[in-house]
């Protein structure tokens, strides 16, 4: 395929003119959609292309108004200039990105030429190092390409690097002994969330407009909430996990992205969804997620869950965010009443812990076999080692029982949602945590577990039941973003996207950015 560069190359003057003109148009559109003074969080350090989402950037490349080379050079410059403050990038893949652009991007693709980050976790791309956030994988070089990576590239995305993640994706913060802490662009003393924390920090800071993320217990929604982004966890098996793996965390985890706009998320899920050969099961059939963002949802019955299943206390700011969202949704014509699904929080916690512990043990044993030596305390962080020790004690019957308990929870949730279309709650029980509080370097595993469970008590239930769930960036308190979660019925991402687009139109967040 021919290169997407303009004949003879673009002059600097022409580039500057295009950036200014496109940005002015985007700014005018946002001002029309959201009149009034911008949020106090609006930064003055952005250029005009920050006003365009990934689909809009891809459209400009398709029309020839911008080139993929221009976008790549801008992303590289942003990473070099801004990453030092937040530590969001695990690996730079600039040469691979340049080769991809030189080979020519598909101008018919929805995200033609748009810079993109892969999460540094169970996502293989030859020519890169994938550490899983761990010293034990510090030299791991994938030899094959994950199916989801192929689909990202077919969608036109240009992979410029990998984003930071906690070790094996186990923590609701992104802090590792391998690379240090990834900082929240809104407040550098706070966590950006986890496990897709590097992805969310990079998008919030404007390094790239969209980034790959995965979610096994809230790992898309938690960092989306912490960094003021939109993040949707798809239905179980909606996106591919292979060919290296058959499923993530026995079906708890799936891959997608964090974005600024709802339509970017929907269009990307259109591009990457669907089973791959050999999958044991697949998510229900669906229509176009992007088309769903253009439809007004019907009047929905929404259950407001203000209290987590375990009764964990919730910070007033997080409750205020959920209550404000309930008021907004009521004003949009939906029926909102307080209700909570009848699930056993203790059984769910035991099942979740057993499954994750076994998965951690298996991962370490597989890596040890590949290296030809056993793993030790110097290879992994204390929380990871404690989980692996737990996993060694979970026998086959206990693991099978944990999976049965997840299935039972899914049936109970389906019964509950016969009466409700959506469950609304805070995404987190507290605003973004101070750095250090949730790090896996904590030698007290029980204390770490309590802190993690009380920080994010609303998210993991959707992983266990397999339902789609999203975090909406509707609230800011004391200069920190606070997300609101919506859980939909199994297989019904279209309804969530329709609702999200309606909310985004009624209460826009595109203008709300962290201060540089």
Image (cartoon, rainbow, N blue to C red):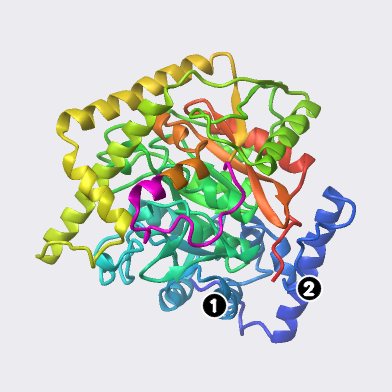
- Nearest the viewer among 493 and 37 is 37
**Location of residue 196 in the rendering, given as x and y in whole percent from the top left corner:** 47, 55
Any part of residue 243 in sight = no
Residue at 22% over, 32% down = 399
**Position in image of residue 61 (x %, y %):** 62, 65
Which badge, 1 or 2, is on the more N-terminal residue? 2
Quarter of the view holding residue 379: bottom left
Q: Dot 1: what SS? A: helix
Report the disc number at residue 223: none
Q: Main secondary structure of the magenta part?
A: loop
The residue labelled by disc 2 is 20
Q: Residue at x 75, y 69 (%)?
A: 48
| Location of the C terminus (image quadrant) | bottom right
The stretch in magenta equals 428-449
**In the figure, is residue 479 to the left or right of 110?**
right
Which residue is found at the position 44% from the left and 54% from the top?
195
- Is 76 magenta? The answer is no
Q: Name above or below for residue 414 compared with residue 79.
A: above
Q: Residues within 10 Å of mark 2 (few under 14, many from 20)?
A: some
Pair 1/2: label in front: 1
> Is residue 11 depicted above or below 98 in this figure?
below
* Residue 328, horizontal then vertical, whole percent: 77, 33
> In the rendered image, which residue does mark 1 sit on?
84
Q: Quadrant of residue 14?
A: bottom right
Q: Residue furthest right?
A: 36
- Few, some or many residues within 10 Å of mark 1 (<14, 14–19, 20+): few
User: In which image quadrant can residue 368 be found?
Assistant: bottom left
Q: Which residue shows up at 76% across the image and 47% down it?
A: 508
Classify residue 127 as left or right of residue 231.
left
């Amino acid at each position: 395929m021919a290169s997407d560069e303009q004949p003879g190359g673009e002059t600097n003057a022409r580039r500057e003119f295009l950036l200014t003109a496109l940005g002015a148009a985007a700014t005018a559109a946002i001002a029309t959609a959201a009149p009034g003074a911008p949020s106090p969080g609006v930064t003055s350090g952005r250029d005009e292309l920050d006003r365009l989402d990934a689909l809009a950037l891809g459209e400009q490349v398709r029309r020839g108004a911008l080139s993929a080379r221009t976008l790549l050079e801008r992303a590289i410059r942003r990473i070099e200039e801004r990453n030092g403050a937040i530590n969001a990038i695990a690996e730079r893949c600039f040469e691979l990105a340049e080769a991809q652009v030189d080979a020519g991007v598909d101008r018919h693709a929805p995200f033609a030429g748009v810079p993109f980050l892969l999460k540094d976790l169970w996502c293989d791309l030859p020519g890169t190092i994938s550490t899983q956030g761990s010293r034990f994988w510090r030299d791991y070089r994938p030899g094959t390409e994950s199916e989801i990576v192929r689909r990202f590239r077919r969608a036109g995305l240009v992979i410029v690097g990998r984003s930071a993640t906690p070790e094996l994706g186990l923590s609701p913060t992104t802090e590792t002994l391998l690379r240090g802490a990834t900082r929240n662009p809104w407040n550098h003393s706070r966590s950006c969330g986890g496990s897709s924390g590097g992805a969310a920090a990079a998008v919030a800071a404007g390094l790239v407009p969209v980034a790959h993320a995965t979610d096994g217990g809230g790992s898309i929604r938690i960092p989306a909430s912490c960094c003021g982004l939109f993040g949707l966890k798809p239905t179980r098996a909606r996106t591919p996990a292979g060919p290296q793996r058959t499923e993530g965390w026995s079906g708890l985890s799936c891959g997608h992205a964090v974005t600024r706009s709802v339509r970017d998320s929907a269009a990307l899920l259109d591009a990457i969804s669907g089973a791959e050969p050999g999958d044991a099961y697949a998510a229900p059939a669906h229509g176009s997620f992007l088309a769903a963002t253009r439809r007004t949802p019907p009047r929905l019955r929404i259950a407001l869950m203000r209290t987590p299943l375990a009764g964990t206390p919730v910070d007033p700011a997080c409750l205020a965010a959920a209550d404000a969202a309930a008021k907004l949704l009521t004003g949009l014509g939906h029926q909102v009443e307080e209700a909570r699904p009848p699930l056993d929080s203790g059984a769910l916690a035991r099942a979740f812990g057993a499954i994750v512990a076994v998965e951690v043990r298996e991962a370490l044993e597989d890596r040890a076999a590949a290296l030809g030596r056993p793993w030790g305390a110097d290879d992994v962080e204390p929380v990871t080692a404690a989980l692996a020790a737990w996993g060694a004690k979970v026998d086959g019957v206990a693991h099978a029982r944990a999976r049965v308990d997840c299935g039972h929870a899914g049936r109970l949730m389906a019964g509950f949602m016969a009466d409700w279309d959506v469950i609304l709650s805070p995404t987190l029980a507290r605003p973004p945590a101070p750095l250090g509080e949730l790090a896996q370097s904590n030698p007290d595993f029980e204390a770490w577990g309590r802190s993690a469970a009380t920080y994010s008590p609303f998210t993991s239930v959707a992983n266990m039941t397999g339902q789609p769930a999203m975090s909406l960036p509707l609230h800011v308190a004391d200069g920190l973003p606070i997300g609101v979660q919506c859980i939909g019925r199994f297989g019904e991402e279209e309804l969530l996207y329709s609702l999200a687009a309606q909310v985004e139109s009624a209460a826009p967040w595109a203008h709300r950015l962290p201060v540089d």
